[in-house]
Amino acid sequence: MADGNRSLIIENERVFAADCSALFKAFSDPDVLAKWWGPHGFTNRIEKFEFENGGTWMIVMTSSSDTDFENHWTFEDIRPDERIVAFHHGPMHAFGLEIGFHEADADTRLTWRMSFEDTEENRQIEKLLRAANEQNFDRLEAVLSDLEKDR
């Protein structure tokens, strides 16, 4: 961040009917991740996926209007079944993302924390991003349900 003292935090969380390991796999397996990443209406093409500390993730998200959005990420800290910390370089909206996996009885509470520089532009998209994160969760829930049916 340009100013470590000023950041805009966007947080979402949801409890998923899956154990931490199954939920973590939905992030660590690029074939599964490509099925659910992003808000409704997007498809994904993962071009590079180095799921390790310091690894690169390159994903092209395609909107329902066939517009491509290239995204470049760096994985900063990965702890299986516990957390994933990554940094989104852009080209739009540089931000940090911390995903936490927390046991909740037989389920998992997923926490999703995005850290942005506190700018007017980022404040304007805050509500949009909160809603997009919930759509991510909806899509993830559907993929987890499909995976469970296939077992």
Image: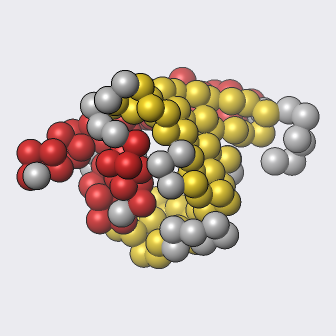
Question: Residue 9, located in which quarter of the rendered image?
Answer: top right
Which residue appears farthest toward the front when viewing the image?
105
Is residue 104 among what the camera can see? yes
Q: State the image coordinates of residue 92 (x, y, percent, origin top left).
A: 61, 53
Q: Nearer the viewer, residue 149 or 81?
A: 81
Q: Nearer the viewer, residue 6 or 14?
A: 14
Is residue 129 among what the camera can see? no
Q: Please indicate whether residue 146 sits to the left or right of residue 15 in the image.
A: left
**Vertical arrangement, residue 41 with respect to residue 86, above or below:** above
Residue visible at 28% across and 31% down in the picture:
17
Q: State the image coordinates of residue 143 (x, y, percent, origin top left).
A: 22, 46
Colour approach in the figure:
secondary structure
**Vertical arrangement, residue 124 with respect to residue 42, above or below:** above
Residue visible at 47% across and 72% down in the picture:
49
Question: Residue 14, located in which quarter of the rendered image?
Answer: top left
Q: Please indicate whether residue 31 sits to the left or right of residue 56 in the image.
A: left
Q: State the image coordinates of residue 42 (x, y, percent, origin top left).
A: 31, 50
Residue visible at 89% across and 42% down in the picture:
3
